[in-house]
Amino acid sequence: MTPPEFKAWENRMRRRLAVQGLTLSRSRSRLPVANDYGLYNAMDAISRVTLSHGYTLTPEDVERWAAGQVPRTK
């Protein structure tokens, strides 16, 4: 996936999660050796409680969250 395609995918996932009342954030790590490099976090938009236990979601996991295949427990 090219960088513009990846950014479009990321924006699409953000919009799909926003409809469900969630926000998506990407780890700010820029070092590929960091534990959270390239990972995502899903949070409740109102209470700001993290639902994914930190930056643990891969892009494939984000797809499943956006599709509603992951139960929402706090």
Image (spheres, rainbow, N blue to C red):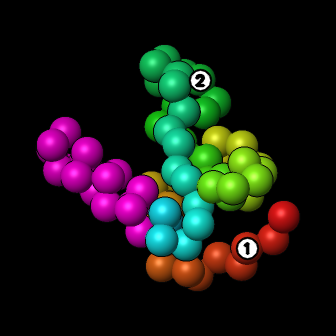
* Disc ID at residue 34: 2
Nearest to N terminus: mark 1 or mark 2: 2
Does residue 23 belong to the magenta stretch?
A: no
* Image location of residue 1, percent across then percent down: 19, 50
Q: Is residue 18 visible?
A: yes
Q: Image height check: is 35 above or below 17?
A: above
**Secondary structure of residue under mark 1:** loop
Q: Nearer the viewer, mark 1 or mark 2?
A: 1
Residue at 25%, 48% in the rendered image: 6
- Circle on res. 48: none
Task: Looking at the picture, tell me which residue is in the foreground, 13 or 22.
Answer: 22
Which amino acid, mark 2? Ala
| Residue located 69% across and 56% down the image | 46
Judge whether residue 57 can be spotted in this image: no
Report the span colored magenta. Answer: 1-16
**Residue visible at 49% across and 63% down in the picture:** 18
52 shown above or below 4: below
| The C terminus: image quadrant | bottom right
The residue most toward the front is 46
Give the percent coordinates (x, y) of residue 37: 52, 31
Q: Is residue 1 left or right of residue 31?
A: left
Quadrant of the rendered image containing residue 73: bottom right
- Depth check, front residue: 30 or 66: 66
Q: Main secondary structure of the magenta part?
A: helix
Q: Residue furthest right?
A: 74
Residue 59 rendering spot, x and y as whole percentages: 45, 55
Left or right of 64, for residue 70: right
Q: Could you tell me the amino acid type at mark 1?
A: Arg
- Residue that numbered label 1 is attached to: 72
